[in-house]
C-alpha cells in the first residue's frame, strides 16, 4: 500500500466539502478529470472504495466519512504549523528564563 499524497488528500477533502467533483476542481484550480484521477489514485493507495458511483454521482462511503475526520485533523495540524511558522518568523515564540539571586 502506497502512502497517499497531500494532493490526493486535498482533492478528497474538497469533494467531501463541496459535494461535487466539478466544484472541488474549481476550488483546487483543477479540471474535473484531474480531481477524479486523484480520487481514484487515493482509493488505490488506500486499497478501499471511498465513494459509491451511481449515474455520475459520488456518494461517500462510511469509510470515507471516517477518513474525513482524520483528514480534518491533518488540515488542522497544517494550519497550526503555518501559524507557528509565522510566530517564529515574527519572534513571538521562544523560551525565557529568568534567574535571580535572593538578597537579605
Image (cartoon, helix red, strand yellow):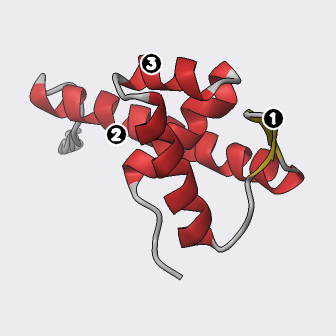
Q: Position of residue 81 (x, y in %)?
A: 34, 39
Pointer 2 with pointer 1, Cβ within 8 A: no
Label of residue 39 in the image: none
In the current view of this chain or complex, which residue is farthest to the right?
A: 62
Dot in front, 3 or 2: 3
Q: Is residue 63 above or below residue 53?
A: below
In what element is the residue under mark 1?
loop
Q: Which residue is rendered at x = 62% and y = 39% of the image?
A: 72
Residue designated by label 2: 81
* Rendered image quadrant of residue 58: top right
Label of residue 27 in the image: 3
Q: Is residue 104 above or below residue 89?
A: below
In the current view of this chain or complex, which residue is farthest to the bottom?
A: 1
Q: How packed is label 1: few (under 14 Cα within 10 Å), some, or many (20 or more)?
A: few
Q: Position of residue 16 (x, y in %)?
A: 68, 32
Label of residue 55 in the image: 1
In what element is the residue under mark 3?
helix
In what element is the residue under mark 2?
helix
Q: Which residue is rendered at x = 41% and y = 32% of the image?
A: 79
Position of residue 80 in the picture relative to residue 39 (left or right): left
Distance of label 3 from label 2 (alpha carbons) = 22 Å
Q: Position of residue 68 (x, y in %)?
A: 70, 44
Amino acid at each position: 500500500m502506497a502512502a497517499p499524497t497531500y494532493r490526493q488528500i486535498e482533492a478528497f477533502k474538497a469533494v467531501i466539502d463541496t459535494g461535487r467533483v466539478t466544484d472541488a476542481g474549481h476550488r483546487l484550480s483543477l479540471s474535473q478529470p484531474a480531481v477524479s484521477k486523484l480520487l481514484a489514485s487515493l482509493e488505490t493507495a488506500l486499497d478501499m472504495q471511498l465513494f459509491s458511483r451511481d449515474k455520475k454521482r459520488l456518494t461517500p462511503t462510511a469509510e470515507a466519512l471516517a477518513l474525513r475526520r482524520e483528514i480534518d485533523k491533518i488540515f488542522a495540524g497544517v494550519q497550526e504549523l503555518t501559524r507557528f511558522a509565522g510566530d517564529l518568523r515574527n519572534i513571538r515564540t521562544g523560551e525565557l528564563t529568568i534567574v535571580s539571586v535572593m538578597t537579605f
